Amino acid sequence: MAGCDRAFQVADQTSMDDLKAASAARTAHEIRDHDYHHVPLAEERPASPYLRGKVRSETPAKP
C-alpha cells in the first residue's frame, strides 16, 4: 500500500507453508489496516500447472 511501511517476509525461502503464512498475514493486514480487498479482473483465470506446456497430440480421427 502506498505510504505503508509494513513488510512481510518469507522466513524460510524453501518452505511453501512459510510462503502461505506470509501471504495470509499480508492479506489480513491489507484488510484490517487499509480496508483493501483484491478484486480479480474478469479476464483473470486461475493458473493451472496442467495446462502449461502441454502439447496436443495430432492423432488422426478414425474413419
Image (cartoon, rainbow, N blue to C red):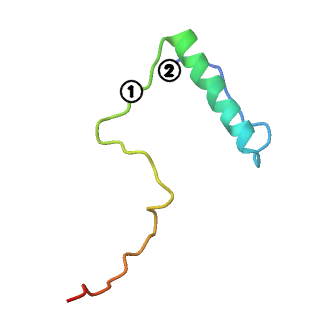
Q: Amino acid at mark 1?
A: Val
Q: Position of residue 63 (x, y in %)?
A: 20, 89
The residue shown at (68%, 31%) is 22
Label 2: few (<14), some (14–19) or many (≥20) C-alpha neighbours in 10 Å: few
Label 1: few (<14), some (14–19) or many (≥20) C-alpha neighbours in 10 Å: few
Q: Secondary structure at mark 2?
A: loop
Number of on-image labels: 2
Residue 31 seen anywhere in this rendered image of the structure: yes
The residue where tag 2 is placed is: 2
The residue shown at (74%, 37%) is 18
Q: Nearer the viewer, mark 2 or mark 1?
A: 1
Q: Position of residue 51 (x, y in %)?
A: 44, 62
Q: Amino acid at mark 2?
A: Ala
- When the figure is inspected, residue 41 is found, relative to residue 52, above or below; the finding is above
Give residue 16's quadrant in the image.
top right
The residue where tag 1 is placed is: 39
The residue shown at (32%, 83%) is 58
Residue 4 seen anywhere in this rendered image of the structure: no
Q: Give the label on residue 48, or none.
A: none
Q: Is residue 28 left or right of residue 11?
A: left
Q: Position of residue 49 (x, y in %)?
A: 51, 58
Q: Nearer the viewer, residue 16 or 34?
A: 16
- When the figure is inspected, residue 3 is found, relative to residue 47, above or below; the finding is above
Instruction: Give the mark nearer the N terminus: 2 vs 1.
Output: 2
Q: Position of residue 2 (x, y in %)?
A: 50, 20
